Amino acid sequence: MRYKWLKENELVFDAENNCSIPTGNGTAAAIEFASWLADGNTPAAADVEPEATEYVAKLVIVDRLIALEKLDIAMTALSANTTAKARWDAATEIAIDDEDVIALLTACGIEVNKVLY
């Protein structure tokens, strides 16, 4: 397929010329694409955009654990798991859907929705 949407009705990729074309901007490439469409052709669909992951800053998580009086138990559990501790130390923020963090909080009896939101 020669054309593929990058952003539906706004930006198309021209595989033949290896370039992207903003639609309707009056360039020769955009006019050629419009003519191709007028001839009854359909570009390939755009790739589905992955859902954006939401993150929480570690300092916010620490503050929320302090407010819940659960920081000590969470840090003890974290220190007992070298992999989890290494990931915590390497990160600046935590994904709200991080399964390992959710499991650790749950194991500590901490309501996840009070920490990761």
Image (spheres, grey):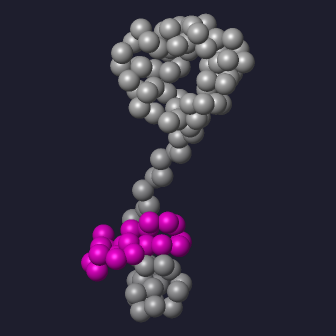
Which residue, as the protein is rendered here, is positioned at the far right?
A: 67
Which residue, as the protein is rendered here, is positioned at the far left?
A: 16
Please tell me which residue is depicted at 71% across the width and 14% down the height of the picture: 68
Q: Is residue 91 magenta?
A: no
Q: Is residue 8 magenta?
A: yes
Q: Quadrant of residue 89?
A: top left
> x, y percentage for residue 100?
45, 20
Give the quadrant of the N terminus: bottom left
> x, y percentage for residue 43?
41, 70
Using the rendered image of the protein, determine whether residue 42 is visible from the camera's viewpoint.
no
Magenta stretch: give its range.
1-20
> x, y percentage for residue 45?
43, 62
Using the rendered image of the protein, determine whether residue 12 is visible from the camera's viewpoint.
yes
**Quick check: 9 left or right of 3?**
right
Q: Return the residue nearer the eye: 37 or 70.
A: 70
Q: Return the residue nearer the eye: 13 or 41.
A: 13
Please tell me which residue is depicted at 34% across the width and 77% down the height of the picture: 19
**Quick check: 24 left or right of 21?**
right
> x, y percentage for residue 112?
62, 19
Give the quadrant of the C terminus: top right
